[in-house]
Image (tube, coloured by chain):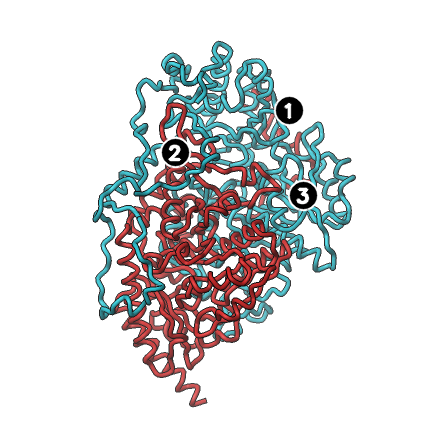
């Protein structure tokens, strides 16, 4: 704790925001009870679980499992009753901010509303209690759903072939780069480099390394797009792939995309589309038509899989014809008739009549498996329900509204007079998100982007993504999504303006924010220096 | 809103940014949108075309299991506060999620007997691949020795990943149902980055984990990795006590639904020395400026959003909500419950194996101890036997050959027994499987 912070009287008392959204720390909210973990609760002998009766002949455990294989002491799991468990987890849940409670303009994360219908249909026993190794003829509903979702994602991306298998966006990226490797190897080529712009999501370069390639960074031009001259200089026959997000992480659609594709394809490399920002262009522009070979989708972004505090997600990929032979196994296939030639292992294994929808493992050029079973099916159910609800026109409306909302919020912030302190980093308009620079604010008001973000918490908003992309000084990346109202966007713009006004009078308020949250600023340095990552038990 | 932006139409916003040649210019060719109730009916109709564990007496396992999920898990995972936030990047308003991660890490460390756990990875087989990657970062070697008792999906996933960074995967065969210790020692050399086995293995057998770890260490000191089944750890010795360095596993049995294979979560625990090379999120304890206890994402300098190409993994969004189900399940089972459940599974599995193994044409694949799953060798075509059973409402288990593609797995049936399968259910399986095998053998003889 800095001496400054130590000596401060509770500043929150004097700093009610103009929206009335900043309670003071003089009266701590109830959820400020000292954090105690489930391991610190309960008492010996207390329990929730009642074991089903032993209905088979009792045999001494020692006979079934020799002592040297057995656990000597029971694991020190909690000893708590069901009401204690419920109170504990409901209690700590209230120490979370969530999308159902308020605006969540976290850039690049597409925090759109999660319809509860999706939870209901995913929980139907026919989906939820379906075993992944159920025979395809007894899982026709699931395979048809996956097939339909694949067709929809294919149409949305403009690429003909889809695998739903990857577990999240980063897993889709890994699939994509491994597919690229297989594609080049199949042509007898060994390439070593993958190009990524300096604005790329961190997952891109991390994936490249994991897939055994070397990262080569591309510069960004004055307009926020790829520096074409830099690309030309670096694109050679040792380049396997260019990974690109379009619109990129600055919220800008790269106008040179066709030329970029030509340059990349000209050296025989593949073009990979990071689909994190797909919510800007559904039904409006398609990666396949831009020249991309491989796309990943984040079903937990554009397609409403709830984020769950960090997952689950799903990261299906769509690919062009030339990449298709290498797709991970199994692939969901549909048989039009017995005669149309799709012969799978399952079919040969002797089912009298092969099922209409099936899993195909006979793909000799496949990169193999990326995980167990068929992927995060529960997420497929939700994404598919979303696509059924919206239809093609609805998806386009969603993207249009997302882009409208982002541009309106950007304009509204200008109207509220914050553009001088928080200028748009690049461009004039934006797609579904925009990036402001907090640099001028920092110089003029002596508060950092982090301070602004923390003060927003007192106003009841989740802050935007901060300090990303890296090339923007004190970056603030704002993505409102299509499911927010004009009133919410106005209120957010008002809050930003109010915080800046307040900081002009007394920057210390923002610097020490937040005040109204279950805990205040946490010492992350100490946490990393001497990590305590589990409860210490007696 | 358009006036504020200074454009005449929404279209103009796009026209000014997306070049004409890459605009779609036509509607997406997808069915029209539907009202909520119609979507529900459509999804319900699809669900009704699946035969779930609710519709038949199921003994399917081989990686995912029909354990009972207590009702309080549904209630908690459906709470907006857990269901709808993003990754806890703002700790002041994410203490719920962060504390859950911390508790989860505590439970997994305790269960595995290892010092550190992350907050979960995707699922089982990719966790094995992640452990392999950690091993290469740790010792720079480029070869994995894996037991043939590892789940085929794990071996295949490891191969897919290893091909990317040019590492080799070598399989060690089984003997009497468990990893051949001599072949294991022989296969592990100075280039071996990790030695990986499953506990229990794919055929249900309990491995001598301590002997495998010791032999590996003695041979060339690779990172010893065990893929464990967490629900067996109430009765099986924790991997940390057996000399294992990294324990990974499929978390689905802990309070997660089958969901046709996902989402679930992968557990990932290790000895302390591997902490700074672990993949995934880790929550750590700290204090706020007022001295109040709190939790933050910690050791983020391992992660992709900070370290980019030098990150220890590319993982970002993983399985937070599924891990929440996991830790709530473990709290629900509790210290004594996990042992009682394990002993119940042991007893029922033993009973089922003995009953089935006594039938003509059915024999135990091995005599090793088993906990919740076992393998039988049928003197009949497994696919045909399974079809006969399924017609009578009993799914007798997994055709090992269909899953692994291995020649030696022909005739092998994997049978899983969860606490949801009572003695009466097992007796029904015995009757129906026995009859099906007898019928198939008669037909074969007749032919």
Position of A312 relative to A410 (above/below): below
Chain letter, cyan in picture: A
Residue at 73% of width from left, 59% of height from top?
A187
Residue A215: mark in rendering = 3
Callout in the foreground (3, 1): 3
In the rendered image, residue B412, in percent from the top left (x then y), is placed at: 44, 74
* Distance (Cα) linking label 2 and label 3: 36 Å
Indicate the position of residue B398 as horizontal and vertical percent values.
42, 68
Circle 1 packing at 10 Å, graded few (<14), some (14-19), many (20+), is few
Q: Position of B429 compared to B265: left or right?
A: left
Q: Which residue is mark 1?
A: A428
Residue at 68%, 56% in the rendered image: A183
Closest to the observer: A377 or A57? A57
| Secondary structure under the numbered disc 1 in the rendered image | loop
Q: Residue at x 38, y 14 (%)?
A: A9
The residue indicated by pointer 2 is: B95
Is residue A331 visible in the rendered image? The answer is no
Q: Residues within 10 Å of mark 2 (few under 14, many from 20)?
A: many
Looking at the image, which residue is at 54% across and 37% down? B301
Numbered label attached to residue B79? none
Q: Tell me the CA gap for discs 1 and 2.
A: 37 Å
Residue A251 place in picture, x, y as percent: 60, 32
From the image, state the color of chain B. Answer: red
Which chain is home to disc 3? A
Question: Along the horizontal axis of the image, is B402 left or right of A203?
Answer: left
Q: Is residue B186 visible?
A: yes
Helix, strand or loop at label 2? It is helix
């Amino acid at each position: 704790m800095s001496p400054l912070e130590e000596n401060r009287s509770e500043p929150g008392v004097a700093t009610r925001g103009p929206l009335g959204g900043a309670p003071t720390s003089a009266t701590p909210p109830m959820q400020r009870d000292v954090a105690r973990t489930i391991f610190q609760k309960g008492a010996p002998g207390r329990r929730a679980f009642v074991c089903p009766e032993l209905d088979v002949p009792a045999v001494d455990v020692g006979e079934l499992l020799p002592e040297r294989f057995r656990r000597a002491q029971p694991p020190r799991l909690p000893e708590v009753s069901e009401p204690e468990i419920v109170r504990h987890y409901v209690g700590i849940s209230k120490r979370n901010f969530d999308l159902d409670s308020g605006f969540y303009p976290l850039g690049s994360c597409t925090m759109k509303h999660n319809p509860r219908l999706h939870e209901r249909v995913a929980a139907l026993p026919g989906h939820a209690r379906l075993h992944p190794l159920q025979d395809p003829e007894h899982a026709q509903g699931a395979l048809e759903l996956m097939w339909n979702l694949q067709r929809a994602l294919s149409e949305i991306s403009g690429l003909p072939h889809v695998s739903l298998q990857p577990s999240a966006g980063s897993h889709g990226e890994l699939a994509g780069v491994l597919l690229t490797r297989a594609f080049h190897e199949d042509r007898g080529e060994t390439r070593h480099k993958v190009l990524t712009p300096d604005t790329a999501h961190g997952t891109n370069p991390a994936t490249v390394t994991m897939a055994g390639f070397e990262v080569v960074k591309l510069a960004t031009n004055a307009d926020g797009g790829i520096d074409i001259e830099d690309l030309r200089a670096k694109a050679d026959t040792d380049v396997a792939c260019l990974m690109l997000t379009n619109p990129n992480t600055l919220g800008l659609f790269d106008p040179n995309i066709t030329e970029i594709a030509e340059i990349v394809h000209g050296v025989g490399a593949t073009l990979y589309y990071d689909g994190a920002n797909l919510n800007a262009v559904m039904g409006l522009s398609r990666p396949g038509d831009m020249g991309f070979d491989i796309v990943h989708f984040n079903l937990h972004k554009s397609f409403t899989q709830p984020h769950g505090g960090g997952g689950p997600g799903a990261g299906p990929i769509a690919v062009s014809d030339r990449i298709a032979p290498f797709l991970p196994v199994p692939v969901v296939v549909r048989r039009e008739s017995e005669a149309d030639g799709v012969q799978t292992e399952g079919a040969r294994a002797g089912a009298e009549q092969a099922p209409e929808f099936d899993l195909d493992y006979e793909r000799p050029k496949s990169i193999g498996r990326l995980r167990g079973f068929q992927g995060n099916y529960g997420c497929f159910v939700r994404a598919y329900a979303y696509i059924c609800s919206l239809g093609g026109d609805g998806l386009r409306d969603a993207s249009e509204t997302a882009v409208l909302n982002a541009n309106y919020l950007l304009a509204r912030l200008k109207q509220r007079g914050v553009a001088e302190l928080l200028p748009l980093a690049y461009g004039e308009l934006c797609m579904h998100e925009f990036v402001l620079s907090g640099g001028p604010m920092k110089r003029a008001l002596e508060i950092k982007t982090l301070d602004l973000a923390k003060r927003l918490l007192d106003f009841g908003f989740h802050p935007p993504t901060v300090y990303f992309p890296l090339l923007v000084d004190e970056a603030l990346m704002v993505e409102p999504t299509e499911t927010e109202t004009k009133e919410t966007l106005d209120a957010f713009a008002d809050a930003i303006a109010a915080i800046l006004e307040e900081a002009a009078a007394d920057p210390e308020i923002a610097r020490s924010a937040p005040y109204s949250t279950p805990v205040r600023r946490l010492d992350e340095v100490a946490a990393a220096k001497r990590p305590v990552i589990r409860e210490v038990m007696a | 809103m358009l006036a504020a932006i200074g454009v005449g139409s929404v279209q103009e916003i796009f026209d000014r940014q997306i070049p004409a040649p890459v605009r779609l210019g036509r509607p997406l060719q997808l069915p029209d949108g539907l009202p909520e109730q119609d979507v529900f009916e459509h999804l319900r109709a699809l669900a009704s075309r699946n035969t779930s564990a609710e519709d038949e007496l199921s003994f399917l396992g081989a990686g995912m299991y029909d354990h009972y999920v207590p009702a309080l898990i549904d209630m908690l995972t459906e709470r907006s506060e857990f269901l709808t936030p993003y990754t806890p990047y703002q700790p002041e308003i994410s203490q719920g999620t962060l504390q859950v991660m911390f508790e989860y890490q505590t439970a997994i460390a305790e269960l595995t007997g290892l010092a550190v756990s992350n907050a979960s990875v995707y699922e089982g087989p990719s966790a094995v691949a992640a452990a392999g990657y950690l091993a290469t970062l740790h010792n720079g070697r480029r070869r994995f020795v894996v037991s043939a008792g590892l789940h085929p999906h794990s071996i295949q996933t490891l191969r897919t990943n290893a091909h990317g960074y040019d590492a080799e995967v070598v399989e060690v065969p089984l003997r009497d149902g468990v990893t051949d210790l001599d072949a294991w020692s022989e296969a592990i050399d100075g280039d071996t980055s990790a030695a990986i086995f499953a506990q229990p293995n794919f055929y249900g057998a309990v491995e001598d984990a301590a002997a495998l770890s010791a032999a590996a260490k003695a041979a060339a000191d690779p990172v010893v990795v065990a893929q464990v089944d967490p629900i067996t750890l109430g009765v099986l010795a924790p991997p940390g006590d057996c000399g294992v360095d990294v324990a990974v596993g499929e978390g689905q049995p802990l309070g997660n639904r089958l969901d046709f294979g996902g989402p679930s979560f992968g557990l990932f625990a290790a000895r302390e020395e591997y902490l700074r090379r672990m993949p995934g999120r880790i929550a750590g304890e700290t204090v706020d400026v007022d001295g109040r206890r709190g939790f933050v994402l910690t050791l983020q300098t391992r992660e992709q959003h900070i370290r980019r190409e030098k990150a220890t993994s590319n993982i970002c969004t993983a399985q937070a909500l599924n891990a929440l189900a996991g830790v709530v399940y473990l709290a629900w089972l509790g210290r004594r419950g996990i042992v009682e459940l394990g002993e119940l599974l042991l007893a029922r599995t033993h009973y089922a194996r003995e009953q089935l193994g006594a039938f003509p044409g059915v024999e135990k694949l091995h005599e090793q101890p088993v906990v919740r799953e076992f393998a039988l060798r049928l003197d009949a075509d497994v696919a045909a036997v399974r079809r006969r059973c399924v017609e009578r409402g009993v799914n007798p288990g997994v055709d090992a050959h269909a899953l692994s593609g291995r020649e030696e797995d022909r005739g092998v049936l994997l049978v899983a027994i969860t606490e949801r399968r009572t003695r009466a259910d097992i007796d029904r399986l015995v009757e129906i499987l026995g009859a099906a095998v007898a019928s198939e053998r008669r037909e074969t003889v007749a032919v």
